[in-house]
Image (cartoon, helix red, strand yellow):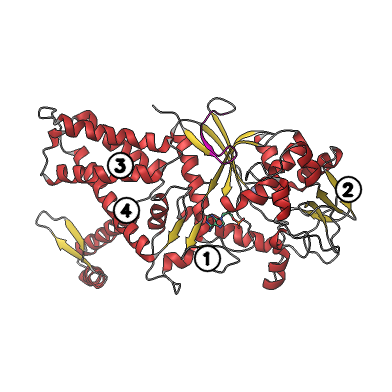
């Protein structure tokens, strides 16, 4: 089997994946900032990492997947002034900041579940790790890469850059970065234009604040991820991920913090997912062009022509490689809806064939058989090539007509060998369910319906047995109104069909 190669943003090339500890993967992904609902763009990033997590599991790794909840700090525009977003929202909604956090964390979990994302193995919160963040700031101060001014601690970027390249992640020199940053106004207390806050002094009216060696305050946004990844994955771990928009500031600062604290780069591989766009513009909270998943599932948004099921959206995302931009459109979603339906139908056919045909291996068409084998092998090869889900799906769609024509009788089942068929069935099953995390919503729903129908048929049978025809007629008539027809078969059984 080919080896797994990952595009590492840090080195800007595809590299063979070699974990720090054989058989184990440590992965940290920046989680949501829970002062508002996640939009579909955020979901794209979390779905991409869910696939990566699932694929590592499929390869047999034991994965520690840490995805944090940002529930503190996070100033507007990452400037070291003003109120944090949680306090602002709490005032606006007349709630406690922690009520805001709870409300949007629960909402986030619900959305993740609807998209069938597996939960991370650890989901730490920033507010639950204040002391770890303070310890790290103390350490950076002690190592001489930070300074305190009136209760606020800043990271000294220019001093750090004299020893290690600050812009390493985006491959930019300090001079260029400085050029692109506005001059200090003279009102600001920090020394350098690129310096960022590790700890921020809180005004008395600030709602979220904690005691620290520098007085009452709250952590800067970047330090939380350094502190929590360090705590749960160690000073250095395998993979750090997040959206591409985080690379230039948040992740650049995380690297600088870890280097300044531990003299070590935090992650060996940096994975960045590309943006979901709407009419070419990045979907974001601040731009106001973010669909909420709930709006998508109900179709309740002026830009939506109809409602789309969570699995349609998941499938839509899988059809594009995670490092390419993905533009939202109704047409694209509608074609994903059709594509997914075709795939499930083919899978159902596979299931059917598995139970029935015997594949006696007498008339094997070697060309067809080896083409099928090649395409099945391509699943893993494509995933090993930087998690290319789009390519796997293309292979699956090439196999769909073969499956359908065997099922339809146009191709005799013995044209492919039993071994090929079994592998086809096995890899389709594993990939659709375990690696891609797709749920067949039709069978999921009809599975429930079948259970309910059985119950109603039983109640009707019992009613008829005691000559309670009004109840049995009521069940039949009301079901008919719902579009479900009951048919009394000759053998005494009752069958049902949906109109
Ligand atoms: P936030 O809650 O804004 O910190 O974002 C949570 C995650 O979603 C981060 O990893 C972001 O990089 C990612 N993200 C934000 N906007 C988009 C977008 N339009 N497309 C894909 N990922 C995004
Ligand atoms: Zn982070």
Could you say where residue 108 lies in the image, as x and y percent from the top left? 56, 57
Return the residue at label 2.
Answer: 213
Tag in front: 3 or 4: 3
The answer to whether residue 325 is left or right of residue 12 is left
Q: Which mark is residue 395?
A: 3
Could you say where residue 419 lies in the image, as x and y percent from the top left? 23, 28
Rendering quarter of residue 332: bottom left
Could you say where residue 292 lies in the image, as x and y percent from the top left? 51, 65
Q: Residues within 10 Å of mark 3 (few under 14, many from 20)?
A: some
Give me the C-alpha separation between circle 2 and circle 3: 59 Å
Could one spot residue 118 in this view of the protein?
A: no
Q: Quadrant of the N terminus?
A: top left
- The numbered mark, 1 or 2, whose residue comes first in the sequence reads 2
Give me the C-alpha separation between circle 1 and circle 3: 32 Å
- The numbered mark, 4 or 1, whose residue comes first in the sequence reads 1
Asked whether mark 1 and ligand 1 are closer than 8 Å, the reply comes as yes
- The numbered mark, 3 or 4, whose residue comes first in the sequence reads 4
Asked whether mark 3 and ligand 1 are closer than 8 Å, the reply comes as no
Tag in front: 2 or 3: 3
Where disc 3 sits, the SS reads: helix
Q: Residues within 10 Å of mark 1 (few under 14, many from 20)?
A: many
Give me the C-alpha separation between circle 3 and circle 4: 14 Å
Q: Which mark is residue 210?
A: none
Point out the stretch of residues depicted in magenta: 8-19
Residue furthest bottom as drawn: 302
The answer to whether residue 296 is left or right of residue 19 is left
Q: Is residue 163 magenta?
A: no
Give me the C-alpha separation between circle 4 and circle 1: 24 Å
Give me the C-alpha separation between circle 4 and circle 2: 56 Å
């Amino acid at each position: 089997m080919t080896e797994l190669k990952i595009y590492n943003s840090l080195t800007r090339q595809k590299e063979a994946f070699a974990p720090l500890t054989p058989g184990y993967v440590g992965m940290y992904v920046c989680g949501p900032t829970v002062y508002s609902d996640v939009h579909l763009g955020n979901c794209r990033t979390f779905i991409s990492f869910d696939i990566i997590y699932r694929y590592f599991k499929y390869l047999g790794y034991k994965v520690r997947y840490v995805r944090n909840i940002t529930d503190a700090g996070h100033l507007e525009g990452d400037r070291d002034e003003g109120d944090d977003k949680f306090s602002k929202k709490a005032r606006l909604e007349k709630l406690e900041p922690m009520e805001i956090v709870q409300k949007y964390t629960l909402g986030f979990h619900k959305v993740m579940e609807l998209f069938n994302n597996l939960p991370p193995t650890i989901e730490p919160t920033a507010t639950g790790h204040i002391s770890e963040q303070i310890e790290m700031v103390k350490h950076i101060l002690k190592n001489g890469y930070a300074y305190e001014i009136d209760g606020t601690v800043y990271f000294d970027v220019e001093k750090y850059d004299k020893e290690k390249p600050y812009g390493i992640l985006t491959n930019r020199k300090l001079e260029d970065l400085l050029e692109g940053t506005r001059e200090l106004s003279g009102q600001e207390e920090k020394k350098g234009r690129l310096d960022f806050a590790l700890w921020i002094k809180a005004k008395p009216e600030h709602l979220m604040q904690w005691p620290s060696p520098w007085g009452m305050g709250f952590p800067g946004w970047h330090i939380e991820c350094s502190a929590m990844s360090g705590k749960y994955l160690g000073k250095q771990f395998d993979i750090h991920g997040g959206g591409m928009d985080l690379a230039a500031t948040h992740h650049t600062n995380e690297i600088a913090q870890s280097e300044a604290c531990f003299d070590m780069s935090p992650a060996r591989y940096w994975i960045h997912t590309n943006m979901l766009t709407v009419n070419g513009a990045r979907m974001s909270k601040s731009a106001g062009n973010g669909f909420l998943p709930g709006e998508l599932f109900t179709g309740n948004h002026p830009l939506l022509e109809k409602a789309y099921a969570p699995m349609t959206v998941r499938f839509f995302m899988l059809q594009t490689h995670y490092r390419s931009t993905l533009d939202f459109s109704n047409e694209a979603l509608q074609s994903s809806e059709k594509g997914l339906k075709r795939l499930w139908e083919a899978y159902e056919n596979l299931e059917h064939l598995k139970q029935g045909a015997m594949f006696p291996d007498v008339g094997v068409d070697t060309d067809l058989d080896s083409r099928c084998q090649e395409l099945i092998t391509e699943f893993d090869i494509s995933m090993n090539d930087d998690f290319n889900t789009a390519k796997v799906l293309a292979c699956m769609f090439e196999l769909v007509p073969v499956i359908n024509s065997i099922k339809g009788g146009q191709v005799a089942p013995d044209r492919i060998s039993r071994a090929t068929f079994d592998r086809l069935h096995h890899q389709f099953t594993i990939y659709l369910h375990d690696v891609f995390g797709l749920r067949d919503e039709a069978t999921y729903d009809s599975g429930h319906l079948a259970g309910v129908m059985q119950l109603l048929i039983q109640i009707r049978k019992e009613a008829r047995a005691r000559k309670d025809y009004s109840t049995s007629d009521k069940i039949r008539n009301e079901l008919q109104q719902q579009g479900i027809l009951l048919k009394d078969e000759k053998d005494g059984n009752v069958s049902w069909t949906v109109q």
